[in-house]
Amino acid sequence: MAARMSCYTLTKIDRSELGKYRTMTTQKTYLVISALGEDHPGLVNSLSRTILEQGCNIEDSRMTVLGGEFAAILLVEGKWNTLAKVENVLPELERSLGMTITSKRTGERPRNTDKVPYGVDVVAMDHPGIVNTLAGFFADRKINIEDMSTSTYAAAHTGTPMFAVHMTVGIPASTHIATLREEFMDHCDGLNLDAVLEPLKI
Amino acid sequence: MAARMSCYTLTKIDRSELGKYRTMTTQKTYLVISALGEDHPGLVNSLSRTILEQGCNIEDSRMTVLGGEFAAILLVEGKWNTLAKVENVLPELERSLGMTITSKRTGERPRNTDKVPYGVDVVAMDHPGIVNTLAGFFADRKINIEDMSTSTYAAAHTGTPMFAVHMTVGIPASTHIATLREEFMDHCDGLNLDAVLEPLKI
C-alpha cells in the first residue's frame, strides 16, 4: 500500500512537471510595450535593436509621429527569461531615449473562430465625434473593434479638412450580415459619413 | 520723456498680450494619449466619448489588440482649457477602464517641406530582426520613419509564418532617389526580404 501510494505521488509530480514544461516550450509568451516621447531620427532603430539583442522578436506593432511626439505600441514575443531581460533594460532605455515606457506581460490572443473579421472604411469632412459615433454603433451590438487607424488630411484639389477611419471589427457568426450592413449604412447616411463594410479576405 | 517711456511700456505689453491671444486662437494645441490595458468590448467607445464630452477631437490615432491587451495612441486636438479638462478626467478613466494611461502636451507637427514622403512595403518569412535591419538602414542615412505598422500572419495556402511591414519615411529632397532605391533593394535582397519603395501619392 505504501509502495502504491508513493508511486501515485511520483506520477502526480511528474504530470505537473510535464505541464510546466509544456507551458514553457509550446505556449508563446508575450510582452506589450507602449512608448511615448519626443520624436528624433533613429528611435525605431534603438527600440528594435534593444529587443533583438535580448533575443526577442517584434510580432506586431504600430508606431507613428503625433504632433512633435513619437508613439509606439509593440507586441514582443520571446521566452520567459528573454522577455525578463527586455523588462530589465526598459528603465535604462527610458532614460537614454527620453521616453515614457509602459510594459505588460500578456498571453496569446484568444482565438475567436465564432467571429468573422470585417473591414470598415469611413471618409467624411472632419468634425468632432466621428470615432465615437462609429465606436458607439459597434459597442451597442457587442461587436469588438480589433484594430483601428484614423487620420486627418487636407483633400486634394479643394483642401477640405477630411477625416478617414479604417477599422477591423469581429462580427459574431450568428449576426445577419445584410441586416447589420443596412443598419450601419443608415447610421452613416444620417451623419453624412461615406462608409464601406466589407469582409476581410486576408 | 516719462510720457514716451510709459507709452513704450504700454506698447510692449500690448504686443505680448497680442502674441498670447494669437497663440490661444490660431495655433492648435494637442495632447498625445497612450493607453494600455486588458481588452474588452466598448473600450474605444468609452475613450472617444470621454474626449468628445470635454469638447476635444481625435485628430489621429492607432488602436489595436495585442495578445490579450488593448493598446491605443491618440492625438487629441482642442483648446488649452478643453485639453486641461481631458487631462483632469484621465485618472478617473484609468480606474474605470482598468488601463494605464500616459499623456503629454505637444504642438503641431513641424512642417518638413524639404522631405518627400515614401511608402516602404516589405514582406518576408518571419524571423527576428526584420524591423531592426530596416530601421538601421534608414537611421544610417538620417531618414526618419514617420509611421510604421507591422504584423505577422500565416500565409494562405501554405500556412508559412509571414511578416509584413508598411512604413512611411521622409526622404530629404537632396537625396538621389534612384541611388537610394538601389541601395535599399540590394540591402533587402541580401536578406531575402521582398521590398517596394514608392512615392506616396496622397
Image: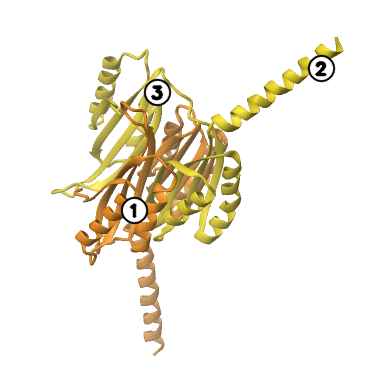
Chain colours: A yellow, B orange
- Tell whether label 2 touches label 3 (CB within 8 Å): no
Q: CA distance from mark 3 to mark 2?
A: 52 Å
Q: Secondary structure at mark 3?
A: loop
Percent across and percent down for residue B9 are: 40, 79
Image quadrant where residue B24 sits: bottom left
Residue B92 makes an appearance in the image: no
Q: Residue at x 53, y 50 (%)?
A: A101
Farthest residue toward the right? Answer: A2
Residue A200 makes an appearance in the image: yes
Same chain? Circles 3 and 2 = yes
Which of the chains bears the disc numbered 1?
B
Count of numbered marks: 3
Which of the chains bears the disc numbered 2?
A
Label 3 or label 2, whichever comes before in sequence order: 2
- The residue carrying mark 1 is B146
Percent across and percent down for residue A177 are: 29, 16
Front disc: 3 or 2: 2
Q: CA distance from mark 1 to mark 3?
A: 31 Å
Q: Residue at x 33, y 63 (%)?
A: B141
Q: Quadrant of the N terminus of chain B?
A: bottom left
Front disc: 2 or 1: 2
- The residue carrying mark 2 is A6
Image vertical order of residue B151 relative to residue A182, above or below: below
Q: Which mark is residue A143?
A: 3
